[in-house]
Image: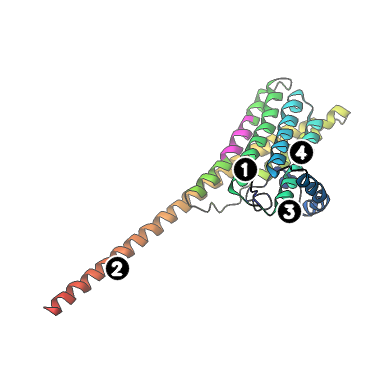
């Protein structure tokens, strides 16, 4: 099965691993993980399998630990499986394979991972966390994140570039939420006051996602109007050209007579 070199190396929407590691850290871990990726290839493991296992680990870390309030250990588990995003891309490059299916799989499973992370927050605040306001904020973060991704995908599907850098895109949502969750988990080890970091982070993500959604909607509306105006101008130019050709043809006919 072909794997997408581009999609697992340089994507418009960052994967979970790329969101949590800067370019220098990615370069370091790429060198470190290359032998491991080569070992998996020799064992007959496909990049798709690594992607699926990585997503399953993220989902387990989020939906098993977070609803129990174990934010530190849940984030540790999620972070460990984040490296699958780097391993599958490394494997794809070594294999020299590229496919639309791989790009589709990566993008789809990214949405699953996002949903699990914020779903874990929702379950905690609806249960042991006992805070309906933060539960609602977490739901908004989950929904708005999916809609923000959808607006770009839908805009591009109708031929628009959706050329806008939103205030809080996927990378920012993940880094802010996961770092805050991991640090908040240190409260269980006796660090005072740090448990308030996650609620603050969720409010930041919620407001930032709303702003980003508005930015993308406004951008799509503007680009759509510009595209329709350009199409109308082309139609008018085409009509004028046809009119001129008909006019010339009629004069030629009269001269021949």
* Dot 3: element: helix
**In the rendered image, is residue 193 in sight?**
no
N-terminal-most mark, 2 or 1? 1
User: How many angstroms separate mark 1 from mark 3 (CA)?
Assistant: 21 Å
User: How many angstroms separate mark 4 from mark 2 (CA)?
Assistant: 61 Å
N-terminal-most mark, 1 or 3? 3
Res 81 label: 4
Q: Which residue is mark 1?
A: 107
Res 94 label: 3
- Mark 3 touching mark 4, by CB under 8 A? no
Q: Residue at x 61, y 32 (%)?
A: 140
* Dot 2: element: helix
Q: Which residue is mark 2?
A: 241
Looking at the image, residue 114 lies above or below residue 21:
above
Q: Residue at x 73, y 34 (%)?
A: 58
Q: Which residues are magenta?
A: 139-147
Q: Nearer the viewer, mark 3 or mark 4?
A: 3
């Amino acid at each position: 099965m072909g794997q997408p070199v581009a999609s697992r190396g340089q994507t418009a929407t960052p994967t979970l691993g790329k969101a949590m590691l800067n370019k220098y850290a990615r370069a370091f871990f790429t060198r470190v993980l290359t032998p491991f990726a080569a070992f998996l290839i020799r064992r007959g493991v496909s990049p798709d399998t690594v992607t699926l296992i990585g997503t399953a680990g993220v989902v387990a870390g989020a939906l098993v630990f977070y609803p129990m309030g174990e934010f530190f250990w849940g984030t540790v588990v999620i972070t460990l499986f984040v490296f699958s995003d780097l391993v599958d891309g490394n494997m794809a490059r070594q294999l020299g394979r590229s496919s639309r299916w791989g790009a589709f799989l990566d993008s789809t499973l990214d949405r699953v991972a996002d949903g699990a992370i914020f779903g874990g927050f929702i379950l905690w605040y609806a249960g042991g966390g006992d805070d309906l306001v933060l539960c609602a904020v977490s739901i908004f973060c989950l929904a708005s994140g999916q809609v923000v991704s959808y607006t770009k995908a839908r805009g591009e599907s109708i031929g628009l570039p959706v050329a806008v850098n939103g205030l809080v895109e996927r990378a920012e949502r993940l880094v802010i939420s996961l770092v805050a969750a991991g640090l908040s988990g240190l409260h269980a080890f006796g660090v005072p006051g740090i448990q308030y970091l996650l609620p603050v982070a969720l409010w930041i993500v919620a407001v930032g996602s709303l702003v980003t959604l508005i930015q993308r909607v406004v951008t799509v509306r503007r680009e759509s109007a510009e595209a329709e105006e350009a199409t109308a101008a082309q139609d008018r130019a085409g009509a004028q050209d046809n009119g001129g050709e008909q006019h010339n043809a009629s004069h030629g006919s009269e001269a021949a007579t």
